[in-house]
Amino acid sequence: MGRLDLASLVSAGSCSLLAMTLRCLYSDAHLTICFDSCNDWLYVDWAGELTLPVVQAACVRVAQCFLAHPYPRVLNDNTFVTSISWNVAPWLIRAFLPHLRLAGVQQLAWVCSPSLPGLNMVQTVVTWLPHLDIAVFDELEAGAAWLQRGGAAGSRYPYPARAAAQQAQLAEEVHTLARAVGLPLAPFPLSSAVPS
């Protein structure tokens, strides 16, 4: 089974996968970000060889989605990741994942790549971030089921807007992250990250 081509499926409207209704927010060779309106979560699908520069640029794109809209639940899918550079885990722990709380993430289901190095990297990251509600899975269906069971009642779209101070702090963190990895924010249409 190959990686699902979400971009071609979404171009016809919406698509269903594992009882998900996906609206593509961003897509490139290594990352597809979709809003799942059926389950009210952000679906982040990674693929290929993930070097530190690839992950850094992708994380800026993910962070931009949170600027435009809160997503309390995230289904992070590494099923089609073929390799991960050794320096990705320390960077994620230090520079990206600690800000997920500020972005409003309450639960993160992390589906591992079948490759052993990918699983080891995820377990390392989860160990260093005990304050986040992260669960690790080896199958997409299991991760989706965990999020569906754990979804808080009343946390359906539309989510309440962030307080102005929290939004300003998040915007500063996203801009700092983008500057640190040398990626301009302009190419990503923030309005597309708002579910409709």
Image (cartoon, rainbow, N blue to C red):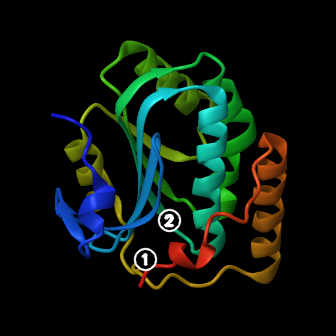
Check the image and report above or below for 115 versus 158. above
Circle 1 packing at 10 Å, graded few (<14), some (14-19), many (20+), is: few
Q: Which mark is residue 177?
A: none
The secondary element bearing badge 1 is classed as loop
Q: Residue at x 75, y 49 (%)?
A: 183
Label 2 element class: loop
Question: Residue 194 at x, y = what percent?
Answer: 51, 78
Q: 130 or 71, which is in the foreground?
A: 71
The quarter of the picture where residue 83 lies is top left
Asked whether residue 129 is in view, the answer is no
Residue 12 sits in quarter: bottom left
The three-letter amino acid code for the residue at tag 2 is Pro
- What residue appears at the point 44 percent right and 14 percent down from the top-left corner? 117
Residue 73 in the figure: left or right of residue 92? left
Distance between mark 2 and mark 1 Cα atoms = 8 Å
Three-letter residue code for mark 1: Ser
* Vertical placement of residue 129 versus 21, above or below: above
Q: Quadrant of the C terminus?
A: bottom left
Q: Which residue is mark 1?
A: 155
Marks 2,1: beta carbons within 8 A:
yes
Query: Could you tell me if residue 102 is visible in this image?
Result: yes
Which numbered disc flags the more N-terminal residue, 2 or 1? 2
- In the image, residue 53 lies at what x, y percent? 67, 32
The residue shown at (58%, 79%) is: 191
Q: Which residue is mark 2?
A: 72
Quadrant in which the N terminus appears: top left
| Residue sitting at x 84%, y 53% | 176
Other residues around mark 2 within 10 Å, as few (<14) / some (14–19) / many (≥20): many
